[in-house]
Image (cartoon, rainbow, N blue to C red):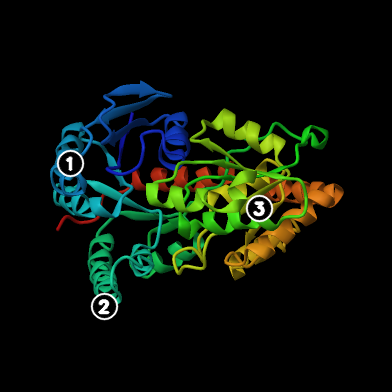
Amino acid sequence: MKKICHLTSVHPRYDTRIFVKECGSLAESGYDVNLVVADGLGDELRRNVRFYDVGKPKNRLNRFWTVTDDIYKKALELNADVYHLHDPELIPIGVKLKRHGKKVVFDAHEDVPKQILSKTYINKPARVLLSQGFSVYERWACAKFDAVVAATPFIEKKYLEINPRTINVSNFPILGELSGGPVNWLGKESQVCYVGGISLSRGIKEIVAAMEVVKADVRLQIAGVFPNEGNILSVKQQPGWESVDELGFLDRDAVRSVLERSIAGLVTLHPLINYQDALPIKMFEYMSAGLPVIASKFPLWESIVQGHKCGICVDPLRPSEIAHAIDYLITNPEEAKKMGENGQKAVEDIYNWQKEKLKLIDLYKSLLSTQPLGSM
């Protein structure tokens, strides 16, 4: 049995893309799948995936140096046939593994140089310098790897110029996970929802502000964790917070319950350079659950939402537009239901993990039938 080793120093061990989708699908296909993490929760076996924990980092500096080195040592100890890296900071590990004649795959979840340019807490000259520097190193290192897995077609296009063995494996929903079939609209409540990572750049302030001016009697369900206490205080002081139910982090069953009771799902990220070409998993999860989406008016997102007639696109920086969209869907339930059905069909036909995993499995079959690229 061929041994595969996925590595992450940042993501939680049960990360949906890494563990549930990629590792789970490979294990189902008969591979010996191992996942090295750094969270301090210990080793375990779950869903035929073996977890190896190198310990939780004490701070960011410790993560970059000590923990990264521990992950590298554990990776060598496991002596896998293929190593699959999930974090940019692990690229140097990939370079070292190549020197040992190993097959290495880099999973590009995001366009990191673009992401650096969007970090407004870094002054602009430093952002540009860091972005350019990382881009040069990324191009040099990833050209040496045996393959790159890109999370979106736009990231795939970029990496194809670096490494011809690049494929797009989008992070689309697993069919049936968040919906068991036709949606019961009679069981809906007068609520909309936001599920996922919470931050100012993801539009939380504008969403809450929209709740202050909506005309309909509706509540907002927020499922997720605020990473910054200062942001919590500023958002909770907004008048619209009186119409918000803060649910905290929810497991997948609880998320499913929230979606079943909601009339629409919000994904109104700010127009940052690294968001506009992204394919946010929450948008497709809303669609899979039969909810119309209220999404940012980005060209790519508009092509999906308007193309499938499954929601409304708004200016994410204008709470009045978000509020108008909420009011429309709450007061036009038949139209909302039709949009939800359209989105659900689009996921069933196109935007689902069952189609994406076939590309991943084919890549592994190809990798394991060929010799690794030359060591450096």
**The residue under label 3 is which amino acid type?**
Met
> In the image as oriented, which residue stretches furthest toward the top?
45
Q: Residues within 10 Å of mark 3 (few under 14, many from 20)?
A: many
Q: Residue at x 51, y 51 (%)?
A: 237
Q: Secondary structure at mark 2?
A: helix
**The residue under label 2 is which amino acid type?**
Pro
Residue 92 at x, y = what percent? 19, 54
- In this rendered view, identify the residue nearer to me: 138 or 330: 330
The residue that disc 2 covers is: 125
Give the Cα separation between the discs numbered 2 and 3: 38 Å
Residue 73 at x, y = what percent? 14, 38
- Please state which of the two labelled residues, at mark 3 or mark 1, is closer to the viewer: 3
Give the Cα separation between the discs numbered 3 and 1: 43 Å
Q: Residue at x 45, y 46 (%)?
A: 360
The residue that disc 1 covers is: 67
Q: Residues within 10 Å of mark 1 (few under 14, many from 20)?
A: many
The N terminus lies in quadrant = top left
- In this rendered view, identify the residue nearer to me: 74 or 299: 299
- In this rendered view, identify the residue nearer to me: 202 or 109: 202
Residue 268 seen in render: no
The residue that disc 3 covers is: 211
Q: Residue at x 76, y 46 (%)?
A: 217
Q: Secondary structure at mark 1?
A: helix
The C terminus lies in quadrant = bottom left
- Please state which of the two labelled residues, at mark 2 or mark 3, is closer to the viewer: 3
Residue 149 seen in render: yes
